[in-house]
Image (tube, helix red, strand yellow):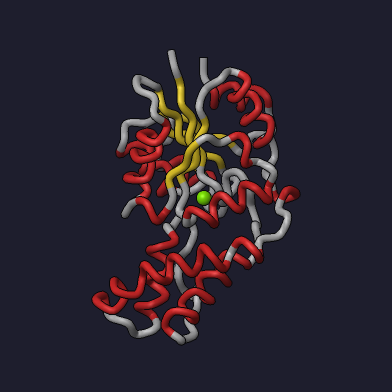
């Protein structure tokens, strides 16, 4: 059976990438619209960057028409502003992540990203985490409206057909995105969502983390 593996970034591959991502969103809005906004009060966990920007702008008093007009320029600005600020985050790679990616690669199955990060933000994090070479494709917030859409787009970008798809993530939105596409869902309790919350969503596999070889074997499957 051919397989394909999709991974979320934040809370799944790395945790605590730093405040630079949020700062880039704030700075992008400042650059395009000349106003100060904040992520305070926005439940960013598991959210797509574009939706986070929309919420920041709504909280700042902008209406949907103004937001829709400004958003493309803000998205472009955020992707320019983030890369020069991203530190080395190789120490933030979660336990067992390098191992599971190496094990999947050794089996020659394609590996891709499905993340709420904007494209250049996501790829930059993977570079600075030392994980870039594991991934041959990815779907990012600027490519679709929902995480479910992004998961489907990622598989299209992989350019393979007839694969059993496994999608791994740390947030309820990752589990929902996998299920909405009929993909096998693996939840890891390495992010902010408690294990019990993930369990209630009934992913196909629920792991504390990827540190144990038997758990990684279960993720990769038989
Ligand atoms: Mg996540």
Above or below, 60 against 159 in this view is below
- Coordinates of residue 35 in the picture (x, y in percent): 46, 86
Which one is nearer the viewer's eye here, 97 or 142? 142
On the rendered structure, is 29 left or right of 218? left
Which one is nearer the viewer's eye here, 152 or 85? 85
Q: Residue at x 61, y 47 (%)?
A: 126
Residue 152 seen in this snapshot? yes
Above or below, 6 against 43 in this view is above
Q: Residue at x 58, y 18 (%)?
A: 107
Above or below, 37 against 55 in this view is below
- Coordinates of residue 89 in the picture (x, y in percent): 71, 53
- Coordinates of residue 73 in the picture (x, y in percent): 40, 71
Residue 168 seen in this snapshot? no
Q: Residue at x 37, y 51 (%)?
A: 143
Which residue is outermost to the left? Answer: 65
Quarter of the image containing the N terminus? Answer: top left
């Amino acid at each position: 059976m051919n397989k394909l593996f999709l991974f979320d970034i934040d809370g799944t591959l790395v945790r605590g990438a730093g405040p630079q991502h949020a700062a880039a969103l704030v700075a992008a809005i400042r650059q395009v619209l000349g106003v100060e906004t904040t992520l305070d009060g926005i439940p960013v966990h598991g959210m797509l960057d574009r939706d986070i920007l929309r919420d920041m702008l709504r909280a700042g008093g902008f209406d949907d028409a103004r937001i829709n007009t400004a958003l493309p320029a803000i998205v472009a600005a955020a992707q320019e502003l983030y890369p020069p600020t991203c530190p080395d985050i190789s120490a933030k790679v979660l336990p067992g992540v390098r191992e599971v990616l190496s094990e999947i690669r050794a089996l020659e199955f394609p590996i891709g990203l499905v993340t709420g990060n904007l494209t250049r933000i996501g790829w930059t994090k993977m570079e600075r985490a030392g994980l870039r070479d594991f991934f041959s494709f990815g779907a990012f917030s600027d490519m679709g409206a929902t995480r479910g859409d992004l998961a489907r787009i990622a598989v299209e970008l992989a350019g393979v057909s007839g694969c059993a798809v496994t999608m791994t993530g740390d947030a309820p939105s990752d589990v929902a995105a996998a299920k909405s596409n009929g993909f096998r869902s693996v939840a890891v309790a390495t992010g902010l969502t408690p294990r019990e919350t993930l369990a209630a969503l009934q992913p196909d596999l629920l792991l504390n983390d990827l540190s144990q070889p038997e758990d990684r074997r279960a993720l990769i499957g038989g």
